[in-house]
DNA sequence: CGCGCAGTCGCCCGTTCGGGTGATTTTGGG
DNA sequence: CCCAAAATCACCCGAACGGGCGACTGCGCG
């Protein structure tokens, strides 16, 4: 930017000098100073337009267009719904494992607790979610956003 | 546009006239014509920049940035996978009802067949899908695109 | 016509689940 | 430190489920 201004000044100076030269050589005795002023006006108008445009060329309008793109939801857990339902962390964990098709026994093994414990948790979470079968729990959990 | 050019001309004319006036009144005897030329240069540079920008303002570069926006899949049934797995229409139907959390008895009532029939179908579809629990069947069916 | 497949149904058996009750231990917050 | 909530485990019972077997009925295709 500084460089451009300097360039502009230099060009302007040279032009003025040139005009002075021309003035003395040809014009001063034949044409009035209106011509001189007019010349300068035209030249610097052109220069002004040119540099003005040049320095502000970067005027870009960014149009953000929303394009529908098919993409899988990244799954953000709905913490509000979780609290609303009142599931504890353990229950939520077990819910997720149920959703993966594991049996109570398998869940127990995975979490190093007895099958009975898993049953207790699952019973409680069924209560809280107001369902009475695991598939229902899974279905409901999915559209509440509790599990992916 | 024509109007603006006329305006520009008019403004320019008035300014020149004004400068001429000033010239005779104050400057001509005290300052050299360099000042006069410089003044005109500055003024018309400014004018040139101003009008240049003003008349070409519409010339903006439009950058279209496409932003991916989430869109739920409308669920298109994956017929290929269905054939691949080899599910019959009835089995597929029952799979869908299982996915809704219905018990075999409820499915039977809904389809006006006995619970045993439902069990037969579900057994067969478990075989074909190579699962052995209904939740697993539901889960697998979902990501094969057999059910919504 | 006959074969095979899909659909229907019944029965049996063992497992899994859901629901209920009760009890102990761990843990986090007032 | 104490209490309530959460987590753990056990036992029981009935319902639901999964697997296996057998059987009968339409229906389409060669």
Image (cartoon, coloured by chain):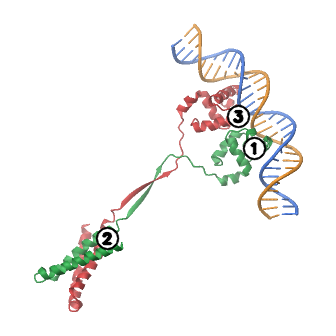
Chain colours: A green, B red, C orange, D blue
Check if mark 2's residue and mark 1's residue have beta carbons within 8 Å.
Answer: no
Same-chain check, marks 3 and 1: no
Q: Which residue is drawn at 64% across and 52% down?
A: A78
State if disc 2 and disc 3 touch (CB < 8 Å): no
The circle drawn on residue A122 is 1
Q: Is mark 2 on a helix, strand or loop?
A: helix
- Write down the chain letter for disc 3: B
At horizontal 25% and vertical 82% (from top left) the residue drawn is: B38
Residue A123 vertical position relative to residue B39 in the rendered view, above or below: above
In the picture, residue A8 is in which quadrant?
bottom left
Residue D23 location (% of width, % of height): 70, 15
Cα separation between marks 3 and 2: 77 Å
Residue placed under numbered mark 3 in the picture: B103
* Mark closer to the observer (3, 2): 2
Q: Is residue A143 above or below residue D19?
A: below
The image quadrant of residue D13 is: top right
User: Label 2: which residue?
Assistant: A52
Q: How far apart in space, not on screen, are marks 2 and 1 (Cα)?
A: 73 Å
Q: Which residue is drawn at 53% across and 38% down?
A: B76
In what element is the residue under mark 3?
A: loop
Looking at the rendered structure, whether the residues under marks 3 and 2 are on a common chain is answered as: no
């Amino acid at each position: 930017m500084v460089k451009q201004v300097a360039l502009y000044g230099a060009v302007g100076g040279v032009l003025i000098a040139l005009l002075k030269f021309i003035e003395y050589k040809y014009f001063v005795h034949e044409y009035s100073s209106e011509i001189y002023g007019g010349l300068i006006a035209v030249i610097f108008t052109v220069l002004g337009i040119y540099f003005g445009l040049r320095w502000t060329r970067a005027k870009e309008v960014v149009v953000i267009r929303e394009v529908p793109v098919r993409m899988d939801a990244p799954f953000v857990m709905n913490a509000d719904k979780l609290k609303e339902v009142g599931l504890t962390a353990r229950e939520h964990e077990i819910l997720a494992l149920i959703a993966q098709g594991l049996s109570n026994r398998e869940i127990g093994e995975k979490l190093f607790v007895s099958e009975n414990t898993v049953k207790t948790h699952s019973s409680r979470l069924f209560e809280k979610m107001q369902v009475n079968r695991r598939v229902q729990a899974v279905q409901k959990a999915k559209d509440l956003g509790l599990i992916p």
